Amino acid sequence: MREKIFMSVCFFLIPFCFSVGAADLKLTTPDGRSVLLKENGTWEFVNSTQQNATTGSYQRMDLDDLKIDIGSLMGKKIQVKAIGQLFGEMFFIKKDMMDMSPITVDIKNLPREQKKYVIQNCGTGAEITVYGTVSKVMFQNGLIAEKIEW
């Protein structure tokens, strides 16, 4: 029964994936399992314990603490909640819209759907959570984003 439901979900969603730009999509089956539909037409179950471990490996930080300690955090994986704002091809996170010392975030490695969200929603600022690695971005300390949530 579960396989029939899963196959019917895949039957309808795989063509849809190709029609929206052939990006990887993560979906949940009716029984609660996560499935990754890949852009090449294949799929695989996502191990929820592996997924939680990945998210759990990020150090949660307040944006002000990140700004203060960013020099000593090079190479560390962090999670930070902030306002994300896109200016042309540059993406910044900041405490609020009046914050004049944002942190630069490199979003080139984000999945297509997350980049699309940034383009569509972060032009005037939107609350997001960034998961990334502290690194040099545009010759200054910043983040290389691996995932964003909204």
Image (cartoon, rainbow, N blue to C red):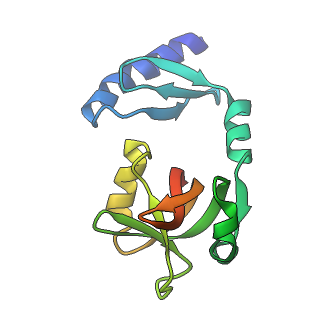
Return the residue found at the far front: 139
Residue beneath the point at 56% across and 70% down:
82
Image position of 134 with respect to 88: above or below? above
Q: In the image, 119: left or right of 125? A: left
Image position of 35 with respect to 120: above or below? above
Measured as percent of width and height from the top left, residue 3 is found at 56, 11
Measured as percent of width and height from the top left, residue 96 is found at 52, 82
The reply to whether residue 29 is visible in this rendering is: no
Q: In the image, 14: left or right of 68? A: left
The reply to whether residue 73 is visible in this rendering is: yes
Residue beneath the point at 43% across and 45% down:
109
Residue beneath the point at 59% across and 22% down:
45
Q: In the image, 14: left or right of 82? A: left
Measured as percent of width and height from the top left, residue 40 is found at 36, 20
Measured as percent of width and height from the top left, residue 16 is found at 31, 29
Numbered-mark total:
0
Image position of 145 with respect to 20: above or below? below
Residue beneath the point at 36% across and 26% down:
39
